Image: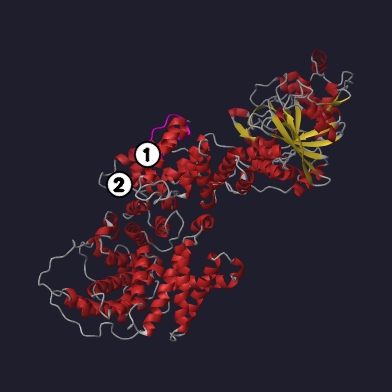
Amino acid sequence: MDDEVAKLRAEIAELRRGLSGLNGPAQLPRLVQIGQKLQMIYWRIGPGQPAALGDLSAAIEVWDEVYSLIGPDDPVRGEVAFRLGQLLAARHSTHGGATKDRETGIFVLDEALTFPDLSPTAAGAARLSLALLHLTRTMEALSPASARAGFLTGLSPGAQDDAVTATRLLREVLDGPPLGTAITTAARTLLTIAESIQQLLGGDPTRLDLGRMMESLATLQRLQRDGLPSTTWITGDPLDYPVAVVPGDEDPTPAVPPRRPVRADPPVVTEPYSARRAARDRLAALTDGDGSPGWEQARALLLTDPSTLAAGDLDTFVGAAVHAAASGDDVAGGDAAGGDDEPAERGVDQVLSAIGLCLRERRDGSGWGADDAETTSGAHRAAAAQLRTAVTLVPPDHPAAAVVVEAVGGLVDDARPLSGAVAGIADVLPGYAAGIPSRPATVTALAELCRTVTALRAGAPVEPDALAAALAAVPTDHPVRHPLAVAVAQARLVAAVHAGGPVTVDPAVGRLGGLLVALHHDDRPALRAALDTLDHDDRARPTPHADPASPAVSAVLGAAHLRLADDLDTAIALLSGAARTLDDGALRTRTWWRLAEAYRSRGAVGDDECSRDAARHALRGAGPDRRDAARFAGWMLAEGRGAEAFHALETAAAAPGSPTVDPLVLDLLAVLTGVTPPAGPPPEVPDPATVAAAVREIGAVALLYLHPTDAAGRTAGVLCLDPATDRLDVLANVPVTDPLASDDPGWAAVMRRWSPGSLLLAATSGLDRLALPAVRVGDGRQLVQEAVISHVSSGAQVVRLAARSVASVTDAPLFVVNPRGDRDHEMAEVLAVRRLCYPRSVCLGRALEPVEGTGTPDDVRKHVSTASVVHLACGLRGTELHLADGEVLDVAAVGGAGGLLLLSESTVGPGPALLDAGFVGVVGWRWAVPAPVAALALFLVHLQLVEHRRSPAAAVAAVQRWMLDPDRVLPPALTGSHLNTVTTSDLAGPALWAALTYSGR
């Protein structure tokens, strides 16, 4: 603290002592002097500096008292209103003041300008401050959420009026007496912004000079950070006029209960006054500290109701604490516990700042960095970051460590304790708290809360019983007990929903609880009753819709109305509003999908186009859903719209699988708890030209998509990508019949077009199980005799496959055989294949020859990335290999896999998933066949690969044709067991040969 500030504080203390015994207007001369000196301190410390906030708030309180003591007809009232309005504008714009500061500032500055005796310079400064307040109100209306709502329903007239008013005021400033270069520059900057906003709101963006506006917005941010140029050049005492001094009562009775008294200003000192010392002195003043350590006083402040503290006193502490946390100084004069340079003391600085910010937020919802989003306030985000820093500075065994954890309670929201700013520290707090010896009950409970928050955000199971047990030990009068009880109720609800059992809702969950129960139990009457109750509650408000639902609530209510399908107009109104105002994320994407369904279900004039438009938005959204995209693809195929169907099919293929729990129930849970599991980014979908180039690289004549076009799967659309022209065509909408049981001409008409040739087939929703190679294409011939078919999951997979190199299968063969000793019959088969085709192969597991490993996961990982062909003669479930010692390896998760994969296990093969692991191709099965038939088929595939040097797809087709041919020629290399299979099996039956399938390039 410099000498001038110290002198001013001493003068203020003397003036305050002189106020004792005075009452009413008799206080005015001294109050005015106090207000002026507090303003001088504020300007000297620096506008926008956290350390100056306390003096600014104290000045506002003094000038507000002066304002209240002066009558409305007093000529000096205009000057006082100007002073008060200027200070309120400074606190709102540069210190994150509450909305009340802005609205009160506008009121008193408007009043000031009605006084003709206000000096021209004061009037100019008042107009400048007033214009800034109107502009900030307009900018608030243009926040992302507000703007989306405005462009849907029109921005409020108030926002446009504010822009007009700001423009008028700024022009008056520039047209009035010169106020100095800095003031003129600020006014011109603000005028540019105001005029640009008017053009934007006026619906004529073509006249908008975007570059000029962006430059001005940068200047506005600086003005909001640093404050408007100083107006200390306004001279003269505002009360320099005759005042009737009215003596007050000797012992007046206060009109309102006094707030808890605090100590006077800290004594003026001549030694260096560190930021830390200032914060600790202010803390002691608030808590009646008696020399106890700072962290003990911090715990006492945590338990304080901020409404019991004078606003100026709390702001003074907050400013000092934020300044100390930001400066990190090590000037002498700090807490004597260990020296200012001790990390733990710097950590306590962070804790004090966090506590102060949280108390100020509880008091008036303001704070530095606050934004307009319906999420976490800037003050809480800043506090969470400071507590995260404190965790790194205060060791767990330090006495202050427990207070670090307890301070997290200030971040916990009463209604949604599992979300918000607490998520910013939840991941590190449980581990930190575990190291604290003799943990208080609140520390244990908050650590369990953070553990629950972390699990929910990761989509992992939660343990509400552990949180409930920790809550039971928290004192009943502790402020954090109520939000923790709500957290337990919400965690129990989340666990019950994911478990799939019956759900009961605690009243603490809120008014949407009944809706969730009805949806979870799929109880339509209860769902109707819940919606009726919510609607009745809305109408019962004094002004209907006076408290409009948030976009997220509108989204789930609209989806619930769509579920009932008895009031589609209401569903569309709610969903359309929510879709346009929600932030980007999975809920917004699902809301677009639901809106598309609602329009399609209503079927009014123009609804088809509205449905497609909503679906296009959904396809570009985050958190894609496979089921919704696939359904839209079916709609588009049924309508013959190839481009939209292509985009939807590719999106569905790239999206993760749909959740097992009803997505609407999950969305409602997210609304109730505020916790939204992480959503993936919008999928990267290749364009048709890129896919066509990949199809040409592979050498196929076409890529065909097969996809159901009705919910029952009775019809299918066929979308063709022609690599020669990059063109998409919807070829047919055919009945889904099994080629093994029917000779439906629909399949023949489609498939005959592309034979002979090599076809890539992307079949979805169970259509990949159809034995299309068995389709009869004429002259008694079947498709397999005319074409080579390779299965893929999507065009994007074709692009990836085309980029992979294909090695000769004889380069580095790998066999995994019988690692658990449950497939002894495979050993002789593998022996024959290795000796005949791959004499220099690697074998893992149990074999009739020496092996290179027992077949553990590590053995497989070591060799699979360099293998040219991998023959799996082991147990397989999905993509998991059953390996030695009872271990399991998910081969789809093995990085760097490559080569061709052959599956001896004749169950349905997970071809697409294995291709995504890096393999160039997978030889597998559509359905199970007898083990001898499977062994014979794979033996023949190996012969085709090695002796005839065919590609994998051609090798599989050649084996199928050989099995189908009644005049087949037996290869001389067939073993006795294979000859027996040939003579005892009906290989020409499609139930055997059509089971063999190939996926890949």
* Kind of residue at disc 1: Ala
Residue at the left extreme?
A: 250
Q: Residue at x 21, y 80 (%)?
A: 29
Q: Is residue 773 left or right of residue 493?
A: right
Q: Which residues are magenta?
A: 497-513
- Seen from the viewer's position, the closer of residues 136 and 951 is 136
Q: Is residue 344 above or below residue 962?
A: below
Q: Label 2 neighbourhood size at 10 Å, few (<14), some (14-19), many (20+)? A: some
Q: Which residue is mark 2?
A: 440
Q: Is residue 319 left or right of residue 738?
A: left
User: Does the magenta portion include 930?
Assistant: no
Q: Is residue 883 left or right of residue 673?
A: right
Q: Residue at x 63, y 25 (%)?
A: 820
Q: Is residue 412 above or below residue 257?
A: above
Residue at the front extreme?
A: 605
Q: Label 1 neighbourhood size at 10 Å, few (<14), some (14-19), many (20+)? A: some
Q: Mark 1 or 2 closer to N-term?
A: 2
Q: How many numbered discs, if any? A: 2
Q: Which residue is mark 1?
A: 489
Residue 591: in sight, yes or no?
yes
The secondary structure type at the circle numbered 2 is loop
The secondary structure type at the circle numbered 1 is helix
Residue 406 image point, x, y percent: 33, 51
Quarter of the image for the C terminus: give it.
Answer: top right
